[in-house]
Image (tube, coloured by chain):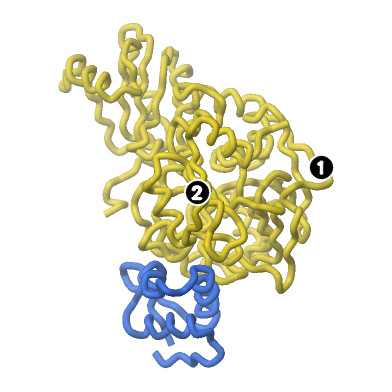
Chain colours: A yellow, B blue
Amino acid sequence: MKEDFRTLLGRLEKEGELRRITKEVDGRHTASLLAQSKQALLFERIKGFDMAAAGAVISTRRRLALSMGCPEREIGARFEEGIARPIPPKLVSDGACQEVVYKGEDVDLTMLPLPILHEKDGGPYISAGVVVANDPAYGRNMGSYRMMYRTPRETGIDLVSPSDLRVYYQKAFEQKQPLPIAVAIGLHPYEMLAASYKAPIRMDEFAIAGGLHGNPVELVRCRTVDLEVPADAEIVLEGELLPIGWTEDEGRFGEFSHIQGDVKWNPVFRVRCITTRRDPIFYILQMPWENDWLAGPVIEAAALRILREASVEPVAVYATPGSCCYWELIASIRKRPGEGKNAVLALLALAEVKLVIVTDDDINIYDPHELDWALTFRVQADRDVIIVSGARGKLKLEEYL
Amino acid sequence: MSADLGGLSPVARRMVEMLQVRPLFFYDLCLELGDVPYREILQAWGEVRERCRFGRDEDGHYILQE
């Protein structure tokens, strides 16, 4: 049987990586308390709310590695191994996520201790929602999307960036039809990683999560929409994306790039039903760090793969947190003459990577002092630095000014 | 802006009055309403959202529109 969100919280607590807060806290302070903590936090009592909340679960490489059950330097390899052997999900008749069901007048998003993640955000956000949708042509899709609280029965959702859900919604919108969705909150990082991974559109992300767990993800049918969600979720929101197009204000939001994004125009999610465990734990995904670490294993796995494709032998790869685990890669390689530059060019071919450092295999690339030593004593800039101009898809500074 | 505040809860009414004075982020409203339980703020924000039309200024502050 696979590990779920709350079992992981227990394991982190045993490892000294999670602190239980028993004193009552104000719901508007949870995110700032998370930002001040070196550990993940579990808020047992939030004033005015009947549920607990946990956050910063994978805000560090150590906690991500613990959740993946591997050494820190192996998160990329572990992810690669999991996606290489997907395990289809299993449908079960009932699940803990439906122990309590709220419908009709009882639907009220203010039962959730929604965090204020940043001062300039457009409102409180559900940051750990995993959205499940279906399309007749492409099949089931699971993805991570931020959802801005609007009213007790509505949230905004960011569908501006390219995504499978955006494709599904565009089709429904053109037919003037709502798109039924379900939003699972309080899932294990493996489901979050699978949801964040840009899998081919016809691939079932639940099978990827199963591969990462080494066990099938158990799914239950939703109560009001024709969709399935992980049976062990803490909370599930069921409803539909209204066929109104990109017409309602959403954001600002502190993005995973550590930069405050602008106001966008987006669709609205109308919630029809909320199901929960009897004693649910709301997951506050701490922006930007947890979001960044969801990218880390994916980018590192891609780096390992592309280095091997280039016939270079990688020893270690590191998607640095300073680059949001996304835009900079450091790799140590067991090199033969010329392969250092081959490795640089191979890694720069990855979609978003814009800065690459390649070292010999005797350098511990996770130690900034060793890395500085290598940069100081082994790099002759006029000979060893490569600058590639005009490549597509690289982050440009002007986009953020 | 002369919104009809009839039927709004006292907290929602305070929010509208604050937004009539100057553009605000949601966080600013929470600071100003420090004496109000957070869940009541969420509920009141929903009321205001349903009743009023918002615009945004160039920084993303909420502005009440006619």
Mark 2 neighbour density, 10 Å: few (under 14) some (14–19) many (20 or more): some
Q: Nearer the viewer, mark 1 or mark 2?
A: 2
> Relative to residue A395, is residue A125 drawn left or right?
right
Q: Residues within 10 Å of mark 1 (few under 14, many from 20)?
A: some
Q: Is residue A192 left or right of residue B35?
A: right
Spot occupied by residue B14 in the image (x, y as percentages of width and height): 43, 83
User: Which residue matches tag 1?
Assistant: A92
Query: Of the residues shown, which amino acid type is indicated by label 2?
Result: Ile
The reply to the same-chain question for discs 1 and 2 is: yes
Residue sticking out furthest to the top: A336
Compare residues A143 and A312 and report the one nearer the observer: A143
Q: Earlier in the sequence, mark 1 or mark 2?
A: 2
Q: Chain of mark 2?
A: A
Of residues A36 and A152, which is closer to you in this image? A36
- Cα gap from disc 1 to disc 2, whole angstroms: 34 Å
Q: What kind of element bears circle 2?
A: strand
Residue A83 location in percent, x, y?
A: 61, 29
Q: Is residue B56 visible?
A: no
**Marked residue chain, label 1:** A
Q: Amino acid at mark 1?
A: Val
Image coordinates of residue A344 in percent, x first then y, are 33, 23
Q: Which mark is residue A165?
A: none
Of A336 and A76, the residue lying toward us: A76
The residue lying furthest to the right in this view is A93
**Residue shown at 66% from the left, 25% from the top:** A85
Q: Residue at x 71, y 53 (%)?
A: A278
Residue drawn at (59%, 47%) of the image:
A143
Q: Which residue is mark 2?
A: A21
Please, is residue A35 above or below residue A379 in the view?
below
Secondary structure type for disc 1: loop
Q: Residue at x 73, y 31 (%)?
A: A1
Residue A401 picture location, percent across and down: 26, 54
